Each structure stands twice: as C-alpha cells, then as structure tokens.
Image (tube, rainbow, N blue to C red):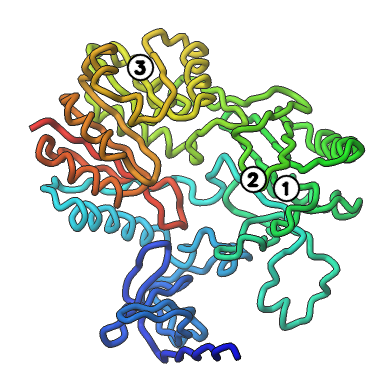
Amino acid sequence: MARKKKELPVLEKVTITDVAAEGKALARVNDMVVFVPFVAPGDVVDLKLTRKKNHYAEAVAIRFHEYSPERAVPFCQHYGVCGGCKWQCLPYTEQLKYKQKQVADNLERIGKVELPEIRPIIGSARTRFYRNKLEFTFSNKRWLTEEEVKANVAYEQMNAVGFHIPGAFDKVLAIEKCWLQDDISNQIRNAIRDYACERHYPFFNLRTQEGMLRNLVIRTSSTGELMVILSCKITEEHEMAFFKELLSFVAGSFPQITSLQYVVNNKCNDTFNDLDVQVFKGTGHIFEEMDGLRFKVGPKSFYQTNSEQAHLLYKVARDFAGLTSNELVYDLYTGTGTIANFVARQARQVIGIEYVPEAIEDAKANSQINGIGNTRFYAGDMKDILTEEFIQQEGRPDIIITDPPRAGMHPGVVQVILDAAPARIVYVSCNPATQARDIAMMDAGYRVKAVQPVDMFPHTQHVENVVLLEKR
C-alpha cells in the first residue's frame, strides 16, 4: 500500500517582507523562511505550504487579507499561471529598487570584494512590448486553469500554442495575448492556431513525440522587418504539402513578414541549431540597427532581446572600456559580434571568440556590412581557444570585454584572463551571482572600479550588470 502523502498546513495572516530569487517573495514564520510566488512585500496572506524542509518552505497564497501599498494591478490575463512576468504585482519603480538591491547583495555576499558606490540602475523606457523575439510551443495537451477544471471545460479542444508551464514539461498554457512583443506577434500566433485547429493539423504531443506542429519563433526588429519560423515534424511525404499550405496561409495573411522560414525537426528536442532552416518567403535574415550600425540576424543568431536597452548596455560597456583608438580588445563570448563591432571604431583591433560557428559567421558578416576591417573572430570553446599560445599569437590584450552565459566563466578562462593581465576588464553579466563569484577569483589582481546595473527585462527578476575592473 502506498504511503499517504502528509497534508501540509496552512499558515494564516502571514506578512510578506521581501523579494527573493526566481521572482518569488519571502516571509519569515518563526525560524522558517517561506518562498511565495505572485505576491508583493507588504501583502498579508494565508499560505498553503507546498513543500517543507527544516528551515525553509515553499507556498502559494490562497487568501489575501491586506494588499500591500507597494502593489500594482497585474495587466496580463495570464498572470499567476504563466511562469513569466512574475513581478507585474510590483510597480516598476519598486522592481528597479529590488533589482538594484539584488546586484548589491550578490557582489557583497558572494563577491566579498571592496566596492565603489553602485550607480543607479538604468530602467527601461518601455516596460511592455519590449522584446524582439518570442518562441511559442504547440501542444495537444494544453494546461487547464483551476477555473476551467472546476467548470468541467470540454476536453475536445486541447490544442494550444503558448508557453510551457513551469515544472510541467508536457503541458503548454494557451496564450491569447502576450504583452512582451509587438502585437503583430499575437496576431500571427492566434491566426496560425485558428487555421491549424479548423483544418485539423496535428499539434505536437511532447510526451509521445507525435504530431506535426512543434514550435513558432517570431522576431521583430528596429528596422520594421519581421521574421517567422515554423518548426514541424514530418514523417510522410504528403505531410510536407499539407504543412506548406499552412505556410502559404501565413504568407498571404501577413504580407509584412519579410522572412518566413521553416525547419523540419524530427528529433526529441526542440532546438534547431544543428538543423537546416529553409526559406519559404523573403530573405533568410532580418536586420537590426544600433548606433549607426546594421546587424544581420538569422534564424539561429543570438541578439539581445530588448533592442533599446541593449544599446544602453553596450554604451556602458564601451564607456567603461575607456577606448582611445590604440587598444587591442578581446571580446569574449562575442555571439554575433554585436559588442565587438560596437566598440571596433574606437579600438585599434578587436578579437572576438564564440562557441557557436554560425554566430561567428554572422559576426564576420556584420563587420563586412558595416565596413569594419579591424575585427577578427574565432569559433570554439572558450577554455580551449583562449590559451597562452593564442595570446602570444594574437597579441596581449589591453582590454578584455566578457559577456558570458548565465553560468559565468570557467575557472580556467578566469585564470587565462589573469595571466593576460589587461589594464581593464569589462564584465557584462545577465547573472550577478556568477559574476560576483568570478570577480572574487580576480580580486587579488583587479579592483572593482565601477558598477552599473541595467534593466533589460521589466516585470521579471532578471537584471544585467556591468562591472569595470582595473588592474591593481
């Protein structure tokens, strides 16, 4: 006989006191810390525990006794179910305050290094419709909200196009309107959904790996161009003709699409970086513009998803670098060479290194498009490429700009940077915790000279941070 699961208690009239990691808030009950999503500091709530350990627990709010004076009214109909934009319940000014605090806490508690006064965070002028890229998933097992379950909603319409529910890999929340990207994104997604449902296109089953329609990527740009990529699974020849009827519908319904592409993905995962992407209409790319430069963005290209804030972020990085046209700059984790090309006109030479070969090809193309002749790019794993031999071959850098993924830098890479001994290091990070860890490893050789947080993602807990390190 299976052991009966222990019922966890309800905590009554608990005051939420602070924000925590992963977009949650926290409360303290006796000696226990409780993490709660979708609440704001100052809320007084009843909490239903969902998980309990010795000194911490997780819970959901099941009743509000008092609303915080700091609380804002969430504007999205999917708030509280969708895993994104968890901070809609906080006014934007409060979000910025907590992001500034997050940066300071990480640098002080994890980095444990001497810090200058941290500059006030640069907020985003646009807090809605600010993203240039979204990816949606097709599923024939849509997530039912509590209201739908209680109302015994008919199960015959279970197809959905939307976002994965956190913690439920095979369930997708049907999105009607998302406030993250220009509204053309909502129009395209909903039109594809309705057309596909009416004509009985099989939506993908994430558990059985069956079905045709898998993913939809929509990219907008500052130039007004629009890219749409549909991913499908095709196992029979006649299915491709059926799928192309859908593509023809999309092309005819949305003439503003300048790049309509598709990819056949018969793998067990959704990534298509290792697959061929085919052009159905228009070009195989779009362009972004920034600071008088044009950047070619293909279906596999990485480009900062908040274009306006990316410009401000890169300006901070360039200002911190203090370029005088005489420096050799290494741009680590260069991606499609956005930062490298952005600073190249103020440098003698810029060398970019990136893991993804396709991104390096984009970086080279972007230099050529903009008439930039003082960049060189290399593809490969950072810890394998950036060696003492490489530095001897390419020259010892005066400045290193590094913008690693969320996991931060490999200890071997940090050591090579220390051995290279540039005068300045500009560390751009989307994760202040791993940034603080890496800075601590460099503290013996470098002091923190300036810190500038930048908000790229309003209504989320994420924050970018730029740190200038100078050689001691």
**334 left or right of 451 in image:** right
* x 17%, y 27%: residue: 419
Task: Point out residue 207 in the picture as x, y percentages from the top left corner.
Answer: 70, 59
Q: Quadrant of residue 234?
A: top right
| Amino acid type at mark 2 | Asp
Which residue is situated farthest in the front direction here? 1
Q: Mark 3 = which residue?
A: 344
**186 left or right of 392 in image:** right
Q: Is 163 placed above or below 351 here? A: below
Q: Cα distance, mark 2 to mark 3?
A: 35 Å
Q: Is 40 placed above or below 375 here? A: below
Q: Disc 1 or disc 3, which is closer to the eye?
A: 1
Q: Quadrant of the N terminus?
A: bottom right
Q: Are marks 1 and 2 in contact (CB under 8 Å)?
A: yes
Q: Mark 2 = which residue?
A: 270
Q: Quadrant of residue 133?
A: top right
Q: Is 433 placed above or below 343 here? A: below
Q: Mark 1 = which residue?
A: 214
| Amino acid type at mark 1 | Arg
* x 51%, y 69%: residue: 73
Q: Is residue 184 visible?
A: no
Circle on res. 463: none
| Amino acid type at mark 3 | Ala
